[in-house]
Image (spheres, rainbow, N blue to C red):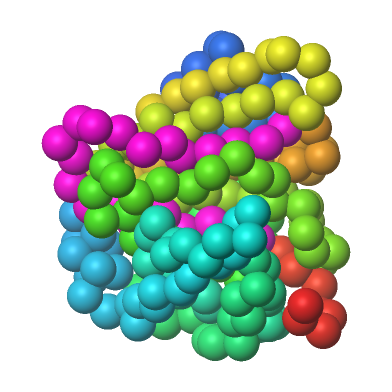
């Protein structure tokens, strides 16, 4: 997959691990000014703490989140109203769109405060896509392992998402794969992740 191209691109993107499945492209050190963006996002984003229910129990969400974009979004019983991109997020979005040639109209921003914060197995397939079904996941801060698991069969893959990197999950990846960011006992610092999507307008759930 290291030679994969985005629509309109004329040269391969280097750096994608060969073990990644078809449809996934990893761009290391892709976003300029990564240190400044990490510090700015931690300070500027109006972080929210939420709870969710699983197996009848109410649990604190193991990360802090914020939602920006042109449309409302709801998941895990949490409703996120539309909120315009901040200047910093708009700058990051412009760079991601330049790299990928895709346009994104929303972003879920996650703050992982340390190794105990995580995201369990899931797929980002609970909304109708607008212009593109691709997702671009931008990472700043501590490097963390990212796991993939096929919905059918036993194929798995993992990679480490580094500071300033972009992982593009192309059209067709969400119906075929689940992903997670597991906990780690390693002494890691904060990580901010921005998951850019293109979502069609609809009523939130």
Q: Is residue 106 above or below residue 142?
A: below
Give residue 120's position: percent from left, percent from top: 54, 44
Query: Where, by quadrant of the figure, is residue 186 drawn?
Result: top left
Front in this rendered view, residue 38 or 126:
126
Please name whichever residue, 57 or 173, is drawn nearer the observer in this view of the structure: 57
Q: Quadrant of the N terminus?
A: top right
Magenta-colored span? 177-197
Q: Position of residue 138 (x, y in %)?
A: 45, 50
**Residue 135 vertical placement versus 111 (above, below):** above
Q: Residue at x 57, y 19 (%)?
A: 157
* Residue 122 x/y as whole percent: 65, 45
- Where residue 201 appears, as percent x and y from the top left, is 81, 80
Residue closer to the observer: 48 or 2: 48
Q: Nearer the viewer, residue 141 or 113?
A: 113
- The quadrant holding residue 111 is bottom left
42 with respect to 20 (left or right): left
The residue depicted at 57 percent of the width and 50 percent of the height is: 136
Residue 89 sits inside the magenta stretch: no
Does the image show residue 145? yes
Q: Is residue 105 above or below residue 46?
A: above
Instruction: Tell me if I can see residue 161 in this picture.
Output: no
Dividing the image into 4 quarters, which one contains the C terminus?
Answer: bottom right
């Amino acid at each position: 997959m290291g030679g994969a191209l985005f629509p309109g691109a004329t040269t391969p993107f280097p750096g994608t691990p060969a073990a990644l499945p078809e449809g996934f492209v990893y761009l290391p050190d892709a976003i300029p000014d990564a240190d400044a963006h990490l510090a700015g996002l931690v300070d500027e984003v109006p972080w929210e703490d939420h709870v969710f229910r699983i197996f009848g129990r109410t649990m604190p969400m193991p990360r802090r989140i914020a939602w920006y974009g042109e449309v409302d979004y709801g998941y895990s019983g949490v409703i996120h109203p539309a909120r315009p991109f901040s200047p910093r997020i708009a700058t990051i979005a412009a760079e991601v769109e330049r790299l990928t040639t895709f346009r994104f109209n929303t972003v879920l921003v996650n703050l992982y405060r340390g190794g105990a914060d995580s995201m369990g197995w899931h797929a980002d397939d609970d909304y109708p896509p607008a212009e593109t079904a691709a997702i671009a996941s931008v990472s700043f801060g501590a490097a963390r392992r990212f796991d993939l698991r096929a919905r059918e069969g036993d194929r798995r893959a993992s990679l480490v998402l580094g500071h300033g990197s972009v992982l593009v999950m192309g059209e067709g990846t969400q119906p075929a794969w689940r992903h997670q960011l597991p906990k780690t006992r390693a002494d890691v610092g904060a990580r901010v992740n921005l998951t850019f999507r293109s979502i069609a307008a609809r009523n939130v759930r």
